[in-house]
Image (cartoon, grey):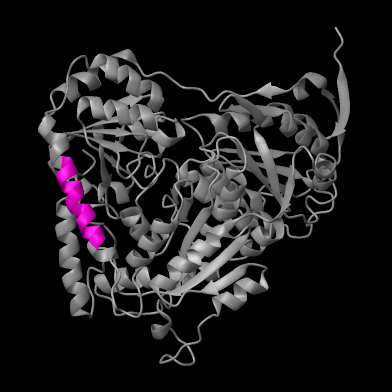
Amino acid sequence: MTRNTVRLTMAQALVRYLCNQFTEIEGERVPLFAGVFGIFGHGNVTCLSEALEQVQDQLPTWRGQNEQTMALAAIGFAKAKRRRQIMVAATSIGPGALNMVTAAGVAMANRLPVLLIAGDTFANRLPDPVLQQVEHFNDPSITANDAFKSVVRYWDRIVVPEQILQSLPQAVATMLDPADCCPAFIGLAQDTQELAYDYPEVFFEPKVWKIPRPRPDREAVAAAAELLRTAKRPLIISGGGVRYSLAGETLAKFAAERGIPVVETIAGKGTLTHDDAVHAGPIGIVGSTSANALAKEADVILAIGTRLQDFTTGSWTAFSRDAQFISVNAARFDAVKHRSLAVVGDALETIGELDAALGGWKADAALLKHAKTLFAEWNKLLDDVQAPTNDPVPSYAQVVAVLNKVAGPNDTLISAAGGTPGEVVKGWRVKNPDTFDCEFGFSCMGYEIPAGWGCAMAQEGPGGTGGTPIVMLGDGTYMMANSDVYSAALTGHKMVVVVCDNGGFAVINRLQQAKGVPGFNNLLTDCRVQNRENPLHVDFVKHAEAMGAKAVKAESLADLERVMKEALAHDGITVVNIVSDAWKWVPGDADWDVGVPEISNFETVRAARKAQEKIREAQRLGV
């Protein structure tokens, strides 16, 4: 029996395979791989770029400015697409590849798909050591690319051309699996990229991938329903998995009919609108007083699509020791945490089956009324801290309120590390579902601007909101990764970047001093600088203008509103700079476990240590 083959280099075959993978979004067949972010070097420019050049109209390649940020842009794209489409990030070997390790960690922590492809050393080892090769005297098979193993779900190195026949389908299946979804990495040996092989033509047949929806075990659903029926004060925690399962509407209906309030994790925020009938606010360390009060009172917690990170659980101090958890998750690893009654399955399917198993049970009608009363009190607190004042320097909360006011219902707010996550998770009032992205699984400074670029790309196609990404970040984060201001200007993608200049790393200064350590090396005024009284500040307007953006400095809150309206009307990227207060924050009422010195010369640190020990006394120790 003969088979039809086509002779291609390994690099050409890899690219042809990617071009023939498809998925469906809202009933429309679209490429699974929407494009490639690439920076070429000697490890990929002669072979991989040759293959990509020939398909640039089918699989567009976007030139990155930095390997880390282009991979972050791919992650922002995947998040905006709710894991329905994937971008590729391709680099050379050595430093180019290692620059992507941080981005891989972001995708891994947030359970997001991105295909990372890097050049590698020679499989035949004849010219070793080659340029940018790191050598391990005891193991010549180790290369820089082994560093990815701890931050990807799938890892492979291609050393003979036919290996991609098995590797590529496994990488794709991993990225699309609801339980395993994370980044995949493939290293391409330089000399293997060039080799020709007779590949079976069937390998390149178009394939439409379907994201599976694993059903839960019937007995687990029945047990969950039995436990929930015993609840006097049930609570639902909605995580990012609800969004990725497209289960938002189903959850809202289930909660409303059963009379159970819903609180959201950071990744889950935006599943419901702020004013949804069952929404009671964000939970945890950067959460609302309403959600945290409900968590303390709850006797049965239905956690759906959340890995129960410490910012959600208040380092496991947010709940009663007697509270029982039902954990619905596609990943068994997450479902069994803290002796939860584990229901392993897709969120959308599991909510439906749990609803059927509950029969006519409903929570006491007073519970949802109580939750909305608490939430109204939280909204009043927000109104108070966000209200304009005569202070010459506005707070983050006041800036958030202005951005929220002028944002259109489909505009997406994007933030990550620093002081903005707490302020936007608490203070941003979501107008439409899936218009909020706060990367706090890895808390990666530098995610924001490239994610805005990736989000802008995602909004253009099926499944996108069609709105404008509004990126909010601090001056410290801007200085870490700003080159994709130029990327967006270069490619013509529209977004608004709001830089709040509070003179350094203000939120970590807040934590430092809250735990008794004098301010040190965070704010510009306590760093080793030439002039502490008047340290050098960056002119963010001139900097952004130099990269091709429209840029303006807002002198007040009223001016910020005017500037933002103009920015949202501008067909391109606008960078808005405003000086903000480093000391004013929306109050919180949850605890967080961090290391505090057991002994110290500072009385303030010794006092903080005692307070930290009190926090640890309240923790649920894994049970």
User: Is 11 on the left or on the right of 383, as rendered?
Assistant: right
**41 vs 480, nearest the viewer:** 480
Can see residue 138? no
| The C terminus: image quadrant | top left
**Residue occupying the far top of the picture:** 1
User: Is 89 on the left or on the right of 13, as rendered?
Assistant: left
**168 vs 296, nearest the viewer:** 296
Give the percent coordinates (x, y) of residue 440: 41, 52
Give the percent coordinates (x, y) of residue 512: 31, 72
**594 vs 386, nearest the viewer:** 386
Decide: is 88 above or below 228. below
Q: Residue at left 52%, top 43%?
A: 80
**359 vs 102, nearest the viewer:** 359
Give the percent coordinates (x, y) of residue 533: 40, 92
Q: Which residues are magenta?
A: 371-383
Q: Residue at left 19%, top 62%?
A: 612
Task: Please say whether residue 401 is one of the residues in the magenta stretch.
Answer: no
Q: Main secondary structure of the magenta part?
A: helix
Query: Which picture quadrant has residue 463?
Result: top right
Query: Which picture quadrant has residue 201?
Result: top right
Q: Residue at left 35%, top 22%?
A: 350
